[in-house]
Amino acid sequence: MGAFYCPICRKTDFSGKGHIYGKSHQSKLKVILVKFMEKVKEARRTIKNPQVEKYSPDHDEKFWCYCCALEVQKHVTDSNISVLYGGLLEHMSTPEHRTNTHKFWWDNKADPKLRDKFIIKEEETERFKTEVSKALEQFEEKEDVFIKQQAAVIRSQEQHRLEVLQSLSEPDPELVQPAEVDQHNNKHIASRSYEMDARPGPSHEDFASHSQWNEPGLGLTFIGYQDSSSSGNVHTGAVPPWLLDEPDEATGTGQQEMGPSLQEFLKHKEQEKLKKLPPNRVGANFDHSSHTDANWLPSFGRVWNSGRRWQSRRQFREEEAKTKGKRKWEDDGKATKKQKDLSNGAL
């Protein structure tokens, strides 16, 4: 027996064509037919009720025909309108697909009862074409209605925009009359003040100013003249108050800076370093506040933390005496115990 390549199992078998009767081959063939059957069922549902939609990149999807060993377009589209499952139904109705399906069933010894389900008859194809033509007409009518609705919305928005612009460009007649009255009052006040300027005398100024502000209809109160010659304001070219230097800044005695100074920071940093060292190290508790003469020499060698170094000699003697007494007591205790042991052994 020669080598035999099975496209269903995707492997070469050396048992010959008897491989197609094996359990492994038949199980894989069943899985393939079930997957293919689901696609065919979805396509058959659209024969009576075709689905027409706008074009989408998803409509360029393709499917693999196991009977023809060929990749075929799943939907029919013209880049504007798509007929779902049109390509699949069209392919399965061709004579080539019918011939390849019979051959596939014979070569793989599939169930003959399922063969006709993978073939589209001519009657079904004609019915599908008729239903597709009706669906296309309905789709075009819906698109026309939708376009008209959108056009009406755009026209209404444009009309509303023009009305708003027109209302803004035309003045309101109710606002024009008060403006004319104010203009007339201003002219009357100006003429009256001009007449009062012709009269001599100091009392004329007060009377003119009071009469100007007490004119009926203005509703204003005269508070007197404000003298701004010394300081000035922003309208006369003076420097604004928010740009003037503050007294503290001018004299250089400002507030204290926020945060620690550089010396305090360095001192804190040094203390943090010392915290990491062992607390019982030599010189950890040394008293740096004590002052000694530079010519002074120590009389006894010992580490000390405060005071004069000669004082450490007395401390050393005291500790040495305590240590000697403790050692002597321990030695006496050991000797007594040894004698007792010897006496017990002699007995």
Image (tube, grey):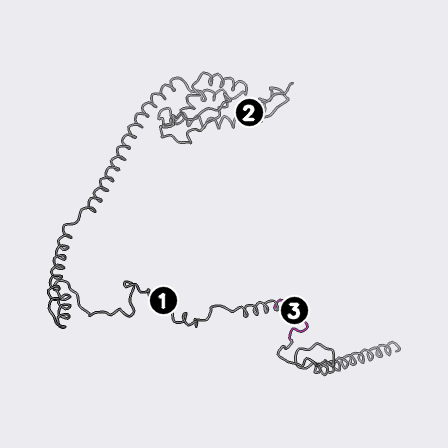
- Is label 2 in a helix, a strand or a loop? loop
Q: Nearer the viewer, residue 213 or 126?
A: 213
Q: Amino acid at mark 3?
A: Pro
Badge 3 vs badge 1, beta-carbon distance below 8 Å = no
Give the x, y percent position of residue 277. 64, 68
Considering only vertical position in the picture, is 4 above or below 323?
Answer: above
Residue under label 3 = 278
- Front residue of this view, candidates 102 and 267: 267
The residue that label 1 is drawn on is: 244
Q: Which residue is mark 2?
A: 8
Real-space CA distance between mark 2 and mark 1, rounded to the nearest whole angstrom: 92 Å
- Discs 2/1, front: 1
Q: Nearer the viewer, residue 322 or 218?
A: 218
Residue at left offset 44%, top offset 29%: 61
Q: Quadrant of the C terminus?
A: bottom right
Q: Earlier in the sequence, mark 2 or mark 1?
A: 2
Q: Is residue 272 left or right of residue 346?
A: left
Would residue 345 be counted in the magenta stretch? no
Q: Pinpoint residue 344: horizontal percent, then vertical percent.
A: 85, 77
Residue kind at label 1, given as amino acid type: Leu
Bin the neighbour count of mark 3 within 10 Å (Cα to Cα): few under 14, some 14-19, many 20 and up: few
Res 135 quadrant in image: top left
| SS for dot 3 | loop
Q: What span is in magenta?
A: 275-285
Instruction: Of the two numbered discs 3 and 2 on the same chain, state the one appearing first in sequence.
Output: 2
Q: Which sits earlier in the primary sequence, circle 3 or circle 1? A: 1
Q: Is residue 166 left or right of residue 105?
A: left
Q: Label 2 sits on what residue type?
A: Ile
